[in-house]
Amino acid sequence: MVGKRKTKSLSKSKSKSKSKSKPKSRAKPSAPSRLTLILVATRKGAWIYRSDRARETWRADGPHFLGQIIHHLVMDRRSGTLLAAAKTGHLGPTIFRSTDLGKSWEEAARPPAFAKVAEGLKGRSVNHTFWLTPAHENEPGVWYAGTSPQGLFRSEDDGVNWTPFSIVNDDPVYRGWMGSEQDGTPDGPKLHSVTIDPRDPKHLYFAMSGGGVHESRDGGASFFPLVEGLEVVEGFDAANVTFHDPHCVRLCPSNPDRLYQQNHCGIYRLDRPGIRWKRIGRAMPRAVGDIGFPMVVHPRDDDRAWVLPMDGQTVWPRTAVDGKPAVYATADGGKSWSRQDRGMPRRDAWWTVKRQAMSADAHDPVGLYFGTTSGELWASRNEGRAWRAIARHLPEIYAVETAEIG
Amino acid sequence: MNVLIASPLRSYTGASMVAADGATVGAVLADLDRRYPGIRFRMVDEQDRIRRHVRLFVNGAPTFDLSAPLSPADEICIVQALSGG
C-alpha cells in the first residue's frame, strides 16, 4: 500500500541539528594515502580510472565489456565489490559483479526482473537496470537497483540474486504515477536516486523520471510521495505526482536531514522533517537558469553542492548554456551560486552531462568529476576551482562514480 | 539437437554450435540455460516473450512461439536482429 505521511524526525533535533545527525565516520576526509578510482559507464563499455595519490595523473583500465551498454558501475565501499548494470543492443539486461577490482567478472544468477503475470495479462519486463546503490552500512551484501521501466529491486547476497522490492512495482497507485513507457525519457522511464539514510536502514528514498520523489520509513513496506514545493511543466497540475520529473536527488552525508535535487523544473533543497522543497535555483543567474541533470553534494559540508546547468529553453536542447559549459557551486545551501569554469572551453562546447555522470570523492579538498555524452571525462581536484579533461574520445558517458582503495 | 549460437551469446557457450535437448523451443532454451546459466534471460524476458532483437529459426523458418514442438533432428538458429549502432 501507499503509506500515510509521517513527519517524525529521525533525530531528536530540529531539521538541521548537525551535531546529532552527522555520522562521524562519514564526516572525516579520506586519508591522503587512499587512491581514487573513477568508475565510468558508457554506451559501449566501462572504464576504471586510477589516480596517483595527488589525483594528478590517471591511468585507464578498460574497456570492460566493450560494446555492452553499461548504465551504472558502482563499488560497494563496505566490501569492495563492483557491480555493473549491463545490456546490449540485442540481449536482455543483466548484472555483472567483480570482487577483484575488475580483473574478473561473473554474471548475476538472477538479475532484476519483474514478477511474471498470469496468462493473458500484459506484464512488464526490465529493459535495463539504471541505478545501483549499496544499502546501509549495517546490511552487508545488500544492494538496491532501480530499473527502466521503473522498478525497485533488492539483492541480499552481494548482487548475485535480485528480487522485486517493496510495493512499488505492482501497487496500482504507483503504477498510475509511473505512467506508460512512453512517458519516460527517450531511453525509457527510470527509477533512480535510491538513497538510504545512514542513520536508519529502513529510511529510504527513491525518485522516478516520471513520477516524483518517494520516501519510506518502514523499510519499503510503504512509501509516500515527497513532491510538495516542486514545480511541474507549465499547464500541468503539480498536485498530480505523475507530472513530477526529478532528475537527481542527493542526501548530504554530513547531515542526512538535508536533501538536494536537480529537477526538470529547477534546483531544490529539502530540510527534514520538513516536507516542502525550496527552489534554490531561483538564485542562479537568470541567463543560465536552473535546469540540468546531475546534482552533487559535499561529503562534509551540507551547505555546499554543485550542479551543471543545461539549456532548458524552447525545445530543451539540454546542452551547455550558450555553448559555454560551467559548473555552478553553492556554499550557503543555495542562497547564492558561483560559476566554476576555469579550464573548460570558453565557447562552442555543446556538452550534455547525464544525471548519473557527475560525482565527488571524499578527499580534502574534494575532487569533482563529470563525463559528457561526447565522451570527455573532466576532473577538478580543488572543489571545482579549476578543471581539466583527463580523458577524451570515450563513448557516450552514462555514469561517473568514484571509489577509493588502499 | 544442434543449436547455432549468435556471436553476442558465445561468451556463455564458448562455441558457435552447441547441443541441447527438448521437445519444444522453450524446453531447448531451458536446457541451454541449465548448461550455460544466464543465457536464456538474455534472449527471453520475464514474461516469456522473445526479446525484441533476438530471432529464432527452426530448420530455417522463423518462430516466435516457445511452445512450438521440435524433433531431435531439428536444427535451431539463434540470431541477432538489427538493433542500431
Image (cartoon, grey):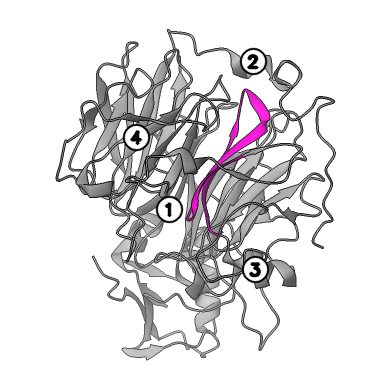
Q: Quadrant of residue A325?
A: top left
Which residue lies under the disc numbered 4?
A: A327
- Is label 4 in a helix, a strand or a loop? strand
Whichever of labels 3 and 2 marks the residue nearer the N terminus, that label is 2
The answer to whether mark 3 and mark 2 are in CB contact below 8 A is no
Q: Is residue A142 left or right of residue B74?
A: right
Please, what is the three-letter code of the amino acid marked with disc 3?
Trp
| Residue A111 can be seen in this image | no
Please, what is the three-letter code of the amino acid marked with disc 4?
Val
Which residue lies under the disc numbered 1?
A: A86
Q: Residue at x 75, y 60 (%)?
A: A167
Foreground: disc 4 or disc 3: 4
Position of residue A286 measured from the top left corner of the image (x, y, whole percent): 37, 45
- Is label 3 in a helix, a strand or a loop? helix
Label 3 to label 2, Cα distance in Å?
Answer: 37 Å
| Of A314 and A159, the residue lying toward us | A314
Residues tagged by mark 3 and mark 2 found on one chain of the structure: yes
Whichever of labels 4 and 3 marks the residue nearer the N terminus, that label is 3
- State which chain disc 3 sits on: A
Foreground: disc 1 or disc 3: 3
| Of A114 and A349, the residue lying toward us | A349
